[in-house]
Amino acid sequence: MLCWPFFLDQQINSRFVSEIWRVGPDMKDIRNRDVVEKMVREMMEGESAARFRKSARDLADAVKESISDGGSSFREFHRLIEDIKSMSIGQ
């Protein structure tokens, strides 16, 4: 994911993509054709590309685990459903 933040929460999201999840570069405040080309090449070729792909695979595995039976997102989603059901029963 190539990040080109513009306003509001895009700055924070971009930093997460590049610095926390490490699945793509952040263009920061530089916006021109040469920088875009360099960033796309960085994502597609060489050592950086391999690092981005590994990070993306690791993140995908974590998400799959979270949404599978017994995973944290799976459990919390079902807890939310039960909370909503309990609110509607009491009315």
Image (cartoon, rainbow, N blue to C red):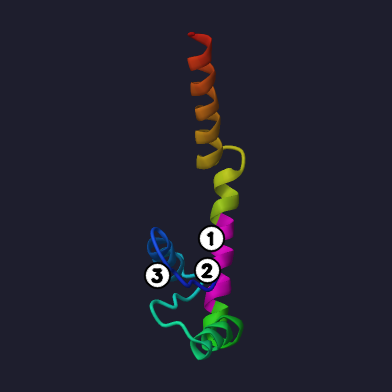
Q: Residue at x 39, y 76 (%)?
A: 28
**Furthest residue in direction top, as rendered:** 91
Quadrant the N terminus occupies? bottom right
Q: Are marks 3 and 2 in contact (CB under 8 Å)?
A: no
Tell whether position 57 is magenta: yes
Does 74 sit left or right of 10 as displayed?
right
Q: Nearer the viewer, mark 1 or mark 3?
A: 3
Tell whether position 78 is magenta: no
Kindly indicate the quadrant of the structure image that contains residue 13. Answer: bottom left
Q: Are marks 2 and 1 in contact (CB under 8 Å)?
A: yes
The answer to whether 58 is drawn above or below residue 85 in the figure is below
10 Å crowding of disc 3: few (<14), some (14-19), many (20+): few
Identify the element where label 2 is drawn.
helix
The residue at which mark 1 appears reads as 59
The answer to whether 22 is drawn above or below residue 87 in the figure is below
Q: Which sits earlier in the primary sequence, circle 3 or circle 2?
A: 3
Q: Residue at x 51, y 91 (%)?
A: 34
The residue at which mark 2 appears reads as 55
The residue at which mark 3 appears reads as 19
Q: Residue at x 50, y 29 (%)?
A: 80
Identify the element where label 1 is drawn.
helix
Q: Amino acid at mark 3?
A: Glu
